[in-house]
Structures are given as C-alpha cells and as structure tokens.
Image: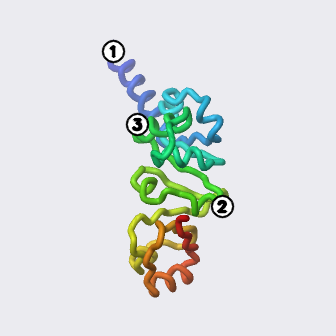
Amino acid sequence: MNHAMLQRIVEEVAARLRHRALSTATLSVAQLGEADIRSLLCQHASLRIVQVDLPLLEQLAGQRALAAAGCALHEAMAWGVRVQLTLLPALLPALAVKKLARLPLTFSDPLGQPVRLHAASVLTYADVARFSGGYLVLRRRPIITALAREAAVARHVQLIKQE
C-alpha cells in the first residue's frame, strides 16, 4: 500500500466521521422498535424520537420491562449517542422525574421548546435563571421559592409538577 492510497483511505474515513457527527436520525417509537439499531448508530451521532408514549418513558425509568424500543434506546445511550425525546405537553406531569433525570437524555415538545427535569426537592432562583422558555418539570411536592417563581414567569418557563 503506497502513501497516496493510505492518504485517500484516511481522508475517506475522516469524511465519513465528519458526516456522522452532523447526522441525526428522526424516528417514531414504532420505527425505533423495528430498526436495526447498530446500523443506525454507525451512521448517526444523534437520535430524535418523536411521538414518545408513556409506556416507553416507563421502560426508560425502569418501571416496566423493556420492549424493543426501550432496548434500542438503552443501547444508543451506551454507545454515547445523543438521544432527544419529543413529548406531548400532556405527558409531562406523568414523567418519573427523579429516574429520567439521571439518564443522558434531552427532551422537547413537538414545537421544539425544551423540557428540563428538575429532580431536586427545592427549586431556587439559580435553577431557573439559566433557562429561557420551555418547560421545567418538577418532582412531587417541590418547594418553590418566591424568587424562583418570579424568575420562571419573567423567563416564560412553565413549571409543571409531577403527579
């Protein structure tokens, strides 16, 4: 193998890695369950799952046995792939905040507004000050300081309590 051929191979590998780093696969939960996850993870650096349902969220939180889609997401997280879940706002109060907050996941609503999980029992101004817009889902019976509540209103952050 001569130097020119080796250089061409290295450039091709680098180009494919750059393309993968910028690539995002968008799938529904049903498509994720049927997909060849390893092939998908080799081609994409991030996954966006739309139309996420409550059973999948319960699987991720460990409250239900894993189905194909849940196994695929756990494998994606194990590979270090960025995973974004798109949730309907109606599902937000049903989230298992404490368990899901530990996982390397990002959440958004269908319009792209960020959804953040706050697993601590007290919400302070410092917790809200970094956000602008979107949703902040709190665990059951949180203590919300007055300054945090004012900051949430001023920054257009909707506070949602876990049921």
Determine whether the residue tagged by mark 1 lies in a helix, strand or loop.
loop
Residue 61 image position (x, y, % from top left): 47, 48
Q: Is the residue under label 2 in contact with that under label 3 (CB below 8 Å)?
A: no
Q: Is the residue under label 2 in contact with that under label 1 (CB below 8 Å)?
A: no
Pair 3/2: label in front:
2
Residue 23 image position (x, y, % from top left): 54, 41
What amino acid type should be assigned to the residue bearing mark 3? Trp
Q: In the rendered view of the protein, which quadrant contains the C terminus?
A: bottom right
Determine whether the residue tagged by mark 3 lies in a helix, strand or loop.
loop
Residue 103 image position (x, y, % from top left): 42, 50
Residue at 61% over, 29% down: 34
Mark 1 surroundings within 10 Å by alpha-carbon count, few (fewer than 14), some (14 through 19), many (20 or more): few
Question: Which comes before the other along the chain, label 1 or label 2?
Answer: 1
Question: Which comes before the other along the chain, label 3 or label 2?
Answer: 3
Q: Which residue was labeled with disc 3? A: 79
**Could you tell me how many numbered marks the image carries?**
3
What's the distance in space between the residues labelled 3 and 2, CA to CA? 30 Å
Determine whether the residue tagged by mark 2 lies in a helix, strand or loop.
helix
Residue at 51% over, 42% down: 64
Question: Which comes before the other along the chain, label 1 or label 3?
Answer: 1
2 is higher (above) or lower (below) than 55: above
Residue 144's disc is: none
116 is higher (above) or lower (below) than 43: below
Front one among 118 and 10: 118
Q: Which residue was labeled with disc 2? A: 90
Q: In the rendered view of the protein, which quadrant contains the N terminus?
A: top left
Residue at 47% over, 51% down: 105
Residue at 52% over, 38% down: 70
Q: Which residue was labeled with disc 1? A: 2
What's the distance in space between the residues labelled 1 and 2, CA to CA? 61 Å
What amino acid type should be assigned to the residue bearing mark 1? Asn
